Image (spheres, rainbow, N blue to C red):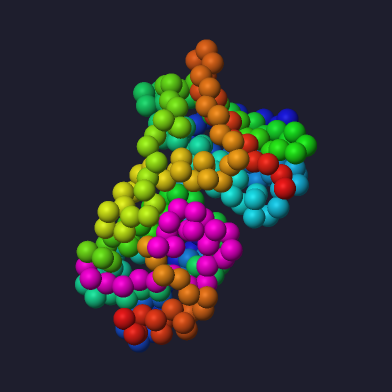
Amino acid sequence: MEITKTKRDDIDIIRIEGQLDGTTSIIAQKEIIPLVTPESKLVIDMGDCDYISSSGLRVLMMIGKQLSKEGGKGVLAKLSEEVRDIMEMTGFSHIFKSYPTLDEAIEALKKE
Amino acid sequence: MAKIILPAKMENLGKLLDFVRENAIKSGLSKKDATQVIVAAEEGIINIINYAYPDSDGKVSVICEDTGDKFAIILEDQGIPFDPLSLPEPDVDLPIEDRTIGGLGIFMIKNIMDNVIYEREDDWNIFTLIKNKH
């Protein structure tokens, strides 16, 4: 798994490439949580992540909790069918909004 | 029937899941079903790695069985008796502030698989996860 961070305007774009499983989630947590600061805006680009386990979901939940505590916003973009199915099954589709493209995700964050 | 036995350590998780993936695909499950079955297997195996042997080293065995219309994964360990199905289910409809971090694994297993059975035989925990082929 690889994580790449870029910025567009004031929005952090975090791209997760590979599997978000029991072994890689710890790395994802360490890399992403520090980016959550007051009023931060995050897009998590999951276009190249085709697998998420409960460890991965736990990390997303921590990010979501941190965002709501700090007053930040976060959305997901480009979910694969496999990942979307799991998000729906576990109620994560209520926690994070998701958008089919990066541009739509960024637009949505700008409006909030 | 195919079987793999390895020390119940996080470093072996990848190997165990590759074994499940290989057998799930061989049994003819769709890509989507195979991915979900691996998610369920990962949850079960991580539980064993994290909790089965609190004071000692032990092994985990993973058996894959293709019965024609079903694909079964059987997870066995000789750790402390533990019925994963006894855990309370998380409320997945709560808003983020009220959601708790734990309990998701078993919930995912129950939702992914068509049948889940826990048995304790002699000093073995036997956790059987069954997926119907469509």
Q: Position of residue A25 (x, y in %)?
A: 43, 54
Q: Residue at x 33, y 48 (%)?
A: B101
Quick check: can you spot residue B10?
no
B5 in relation to B11, above or below = above
**The N terminus of chain B is located in which quarter?**
top right
B129 in relation to A60, above or below = above
In the rendered view, does A61 fall on the left or right side of A78? left
| Residue B18 belongs to magenta span | no
Task: Please state which of residues B47 and B101 is positioned toward the viewer in this rendering.
Answer: B101
Q: Position of residue A73 (x, y in %)?
A: 31, 73
Task: Please state which of residues B32 and A41 is positioned toward the viewer in this rendering.
Answer: B32
Q: Residue at x 48, y 75 (%)?
A: A99
Q: Position of residue A33 (x, y in %)?
A: 31, 62
Task: Please state which of residues A43 and A15 is positioned toward the viewer in this rendering.
Answer: A43
In the rendered view, does A84 fall on the left or right side of A38? right
Q: Residue at x 37, y 62 (%)?
A: A95
**Numbered marks: total:** 0
Question: In which quadrant of the rendered view does residue A82 lie?
Answer: bottom right
Residue located farthest toward the right when viewing the structure as drawn:
B68
Q: Position of residue A107 (x, y in %)?
A: 41, 85
A62 in relation to B11, above or below = below
Question: In which quadrant of the rendered view does residue A5 lie?
Answer: bottom left
Q: Which residues are magenta?
A: A70-94
Task: Please state which of residues B12 and A90 is positioned toward the viewer in this rendering.
Answer: A90
Q: Residue at x 52, y 27 (%)?
A: B118
| Residue A82 belongs to magenta span | yes
Question: In which quadrant of the rendered view does residue B83 lie?
Answer: top left
Quick check: can you spot residue A33?
yes
Residue located farthest toward the bottom when viewing the structure as drawn:
A9
Residue located farthest toward the top when viewing the structure as drawn:
B122
